[in-house]
Amino acid sequence: MMKQQTATNGVKSMATLLPSKHYRRMGRRLALKSLKYSTEMNISRSKDNKMFLEGENRGFFGLFLLHKLVPIMFQQSQMTQPKVHYYDFVLKDSNFTRLCSTKSMLTVNESFPGPTIRVRKGDTAIVNVHNYGRYGVTIHWHGVKQPRNPWYDGPENITQCAIRPGHNFTYVVFFTVEEGTLWWHAHSDWTRATVHGPIIILPALGTTYPFPQPYEEHTIVLGSWYKGDVMSIISEAMYTGGRPNSSDAHTINGQPGDLYPCSNQTTYRLKVKPGKTYLLRIVNAVMDEEIFFGIANHSLTVVGQDGSYLKPVTTDYISTTPGQTFDVLVTTNQDPSLYYMIASPLFDGQYTPFDNSTSTAILEYEGDYTPPSTPVFRFLPGCNDTDAAVSFSKRLRSLASKEYPIDVPKNITTRMLITTDMNHIPCPNKSCAAHGDRLASSLSNFSFVTRPTDILQAYTRNLSDIYTTDFPDAPYVIYDFTGGKGNASEYTTPATRVKMLNYGEQVEMVFQGTTIVSPESHPMHLHGYSFYVVGLGYWNFDYGSDPASFNLIDPPEVNTIMVPAKGWVAIRFVADNPGTWLMHCHLARHLIWGMSTVLMVKNGPSNDTSIRPRPSYMPSCSSS
């Protein structure tokens, strides 16, 4: 107990993000304090003469050595070379007051949303995560491809086991082709509700945006607020087999806004100058609803999505699913006043409660004027307006310029049709909350089951009885997916089935919505990759006619896409990132109910196309 207290004191002053100069000054002293949690860091050289990290790292001694050695790995001899950024994430319970009540919740560095990671294209971030919370936690770098580096991707029991309370783990995050806005979040149970934050990837030095330089940049994080403890909420739901409670509010930069009780004085305000253009970096960290976002009397010009640039699209609103990020330009060309920024839900499921409340923030013009008693408001599409969401998505196109080229796969070698299903699992004696059954969800009627040992470790060490490689290329039962369940069962099969892909495969996947139990939209997210959205439509996908409408010229390149209720989405990508990569619905309840699988991409023919060696300091999967 005393040792844990000493460790806490040793990092207490590091509870904020520290630039690398602090490590240079303090590294040796902190290293001595943390020796009992550290062992020697090894640097190994691969056959292609590139450096990779191995060895034990417990505390700041490892970080001190990383500071000295990683710059050598990247040969930072010029200002234009990529840089290494150091961050310290301290996970602990902190008190927050919202909606007239105070609760303790898990956060990073005592902030909600959490701290921003700010890098340039091509940089590396080294993030030391100290877990002083009550639960095991992992961190996922959402949208960061991590080439050949699945060890640091983060999903619990997929690429690593949890960082146990009282322990720490250092992530090495490689930013390669991403540019724009992404985000990070916890990837253990429901901890991401309070453990998340933005990632800003600026253009590489010597380059600039493909649009006029904005006057200022601001980050807008959309989130969920629960009055109760989120881990207790999901634990109770898993115990009873029923639905977890809906959130009590949506938030904008951590605040519900003045339409909620006890929130008038804390509403987020963005002060702006008239006649300027601002870049808003919008992150959807909401748990279980898609969101419409808009600003009263102002147009939005969308220029980026999920860390890639788009042809500019001017719109009155954006539609964003949990997991997505957008870069949006706003010009302050209205009369000086107060204007609401509004976030309202889209939920097209049937028979399912949801958080149908609206969060607000205020765009506040500077200047000499008498502010109105109430900011100017605007109405966004309705909570069941799937057409508005699909219409917005269909307008998005990749920039596809000489400076930002794309390469859409056209010689497809693997085709998959994957259904997104809501299901039931039988309970003994009909004892569960869903009319006697347990609620579930699945891909192609298989609900993914996580194992105590992470799948990446099982794959690289050839461990048996962890997973099977028989996830199907198409559902075993073909029926009228959007018209009725026909001869398909509402009961799913729990299993740990993965899909094997050879390195270099050109993959086309069609996600098909179904009406089993309840038709709902599903935001599908793929780790380790971006993919091209080549088609989107309603009803059943038709292999005979729908491919003729595919956009193979300038489709958007994203990492998360909404599959509309009673509709389909077609995506393409090249399987050129070896590793085990989770693919799942980003609605929190659907993920925990089983709507996921793993793509297992084999090594290519060379060291450059193979998984990097396993760091020896990965968190233990043992519960002891």
Image (tube, rainbow, N blue to C red):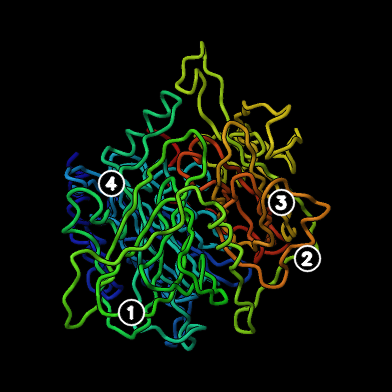
From mark 4 to mark 2, how far is it between C-alphas? 45 Å
Which of the two discs, 4 and 1, sits closer to the camera?
A: 1
Residue under label 3, please give it. 501
Give the labeled residue for mark 1.
334
Instruction: In the rendered view, tell whether residue 427 sits above or below residue 522.
Output: above
Do the numbered discs 4 and 3 sit on residues whose CB atoms are within 8 Å? no
Q: Mark 2 points at which residue?
A: 410
Which quarter of the figure is the C terminus placed in? Answer: top left
Q: Earlier in the sequence, mark 4 or mark 3?
A: 4
Name which of mark 4 and mark 1 comes first in the sequence: 4
Look at mark 4 in the image and give the residue it sits on.
106
Amino acid at dot 4: Leu
Distance between the Cα atoms at labels 1 and 3?
A: 53 Å
Q: Which is more N-terminal, label 2 or label 4?
A: 4
Percent from the top left, x then y, of residue 548?
79, 61
Q: Which of marks 4 and 2 is in front?
A: 2
How much space separates mark 4 and mark 1, taking CA atoms? 40 Å
Q: Please tell me the numbered disc located at residue 56.
A: none
Residue furthest top as drawn: 429
Residue at (57, 42) in percent of width and height: 596
Position of 320 relative to 279 (above/below): above
Foreground mark, 2 or 1, reads 1
